[in-house]
Amino acid sequence: MKKEIFLQAAIIFLFSFFPAGGNKSLLAQSSVPDSSIKSFRLFEDDKIIDITLRFDLTTYMKSKPKNEYLKANLTIHLSKTDSISRDIGLKTRGIWRNQNCTFAPIELNIKKSGFGYSDLDKISKLKLVPQCNFNKINEDYLLREYLAYKLFNVLTDTSFRVRLLRVTYLDTQKKRKPITQYAFFTEPSEMIAARTHNVMVIKSKEFDPNSGGLGIAIPHDFDWTGLVNPSYAIPTEEIGTENVRERIFLGVCRSKEVYNQELDAFFGKKAEFYRVINEFPYITNQVKKDITGYLDGFFDQLAGKRENILYYLTTTCKRF
């Protein structure tokens, strides 16, 4: 338990994290596998998924409805000739991105849609993270945020899994041209709870409130992190830093021995971190160099200035 709690706080230090109507004719073309035995492996595979979303795109962009679902149709393209299409509900979510992005974060209501896969048919709602705006820089931000989740997955199972998407948005009112962009699904909280713990902030199954145990906070929404480094990201005044690439530790106090052990664990994951980044095919070498260069600052200190990091952790940690 202590190890998991430290990992959640330390990933914040590493990344410098500052929170801040369907076309029913397609149904006849849908594949209907046996859901009792076949899993889609939505969050167990890294292959990009091509999907099409049909809905009132103008209402979504202008009104950004958060209280009522728009009628929508979701098509998952299994191959060039095979697809699954279902009518679903769609609404917006989020706060900052909802107010400031052309494409607000999306919640898909797929309950009882009957996709015919064991994992998909257990999901009621799916969160979709789209690009904030149309341009290439926002595409890079989206892909960097996706990678932040994947690096967190390297560290611990108590992290949200994600699945990269290539989404084509079609306007059912035929007022806008089709738009194709990257996006990603984030793992529903009930799925992470089912595979790791029993509730969310999550507590372990052995959690004893009388023993002073702590729950595990699982960070998400990495768009304002130093790893993504968007131009609009400004640290809150309470944090006291000048930019989101200035690292700060926000974790609770542990002994020097515990910190040293967990820093060893981080150092042991360095090669896998860099492999995840360098093998990701959807960003340029320049972006990869920027991300790995940022992480170098952390790992170089681990290799050569370990005592400085330990001093910083033990003197800036939070005491309760």
Image (cartoon, rainbow, N blue to C red):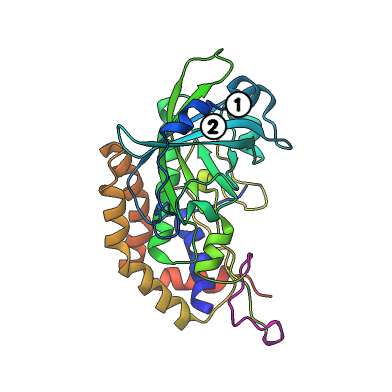
Label 2 – label 1 distance at C-alpha: 7 Å
In x, y percent, where is residue 265? 37, 72
- Secondary element at tag 2: strand
Q: List the residue tagged with mark 2.
A: 73
- Secondary element at tag 1: loop
Are dots 2 and 1 in contact, CB under 8 Å? yes
| Sequence-first disc among 2 and 1 | 1
- Please tell me whether residue 202 is drawn above or below residue 206 in the rendered image: above
Residue in view at x 34 percent, y 61 percent: 299
- What amino acid is found at the position of numbered circle 1 in the picture? Gly
**Region in magenta:** 199-211
Left or right: 274, with 57 as reference point = left
> Which residue is farthest right?
67
Q: Which secondary structure type mostly characterizes the magenta part of the structure? A: loop
Residue in view at x 53 percent, y 74 percent: 314
- Please tell me whether residue 133 is drawn above or below residue 250 in the rendered image: above
> Which residue is farthest top?
175
Q: Quadrant of residue 172?
A: top right
Per the rendering, the mark at residue 21 is 1
- Please tell me whether residue 61 is drawn above or below residue 78 in the rendered image: above
> Which residue is farthest bottom?
211
In x, y percent, where is residue 15? 46, 54
Nearest the viewer among 67 and 131 is 67
- Please tell me whether residue 133 is drawn above or below residue 280 in the rendered image: above
Q: Is residue 200 magenta?
A: yes
- What amino acid is found at the position of numbered circle 2 in the picture? Asn
In x, y percent, where is residue 283? 32, 38
Left or right: 69, with 25 as reference point = right
Nearest the viewer among 56 and 219 is 56
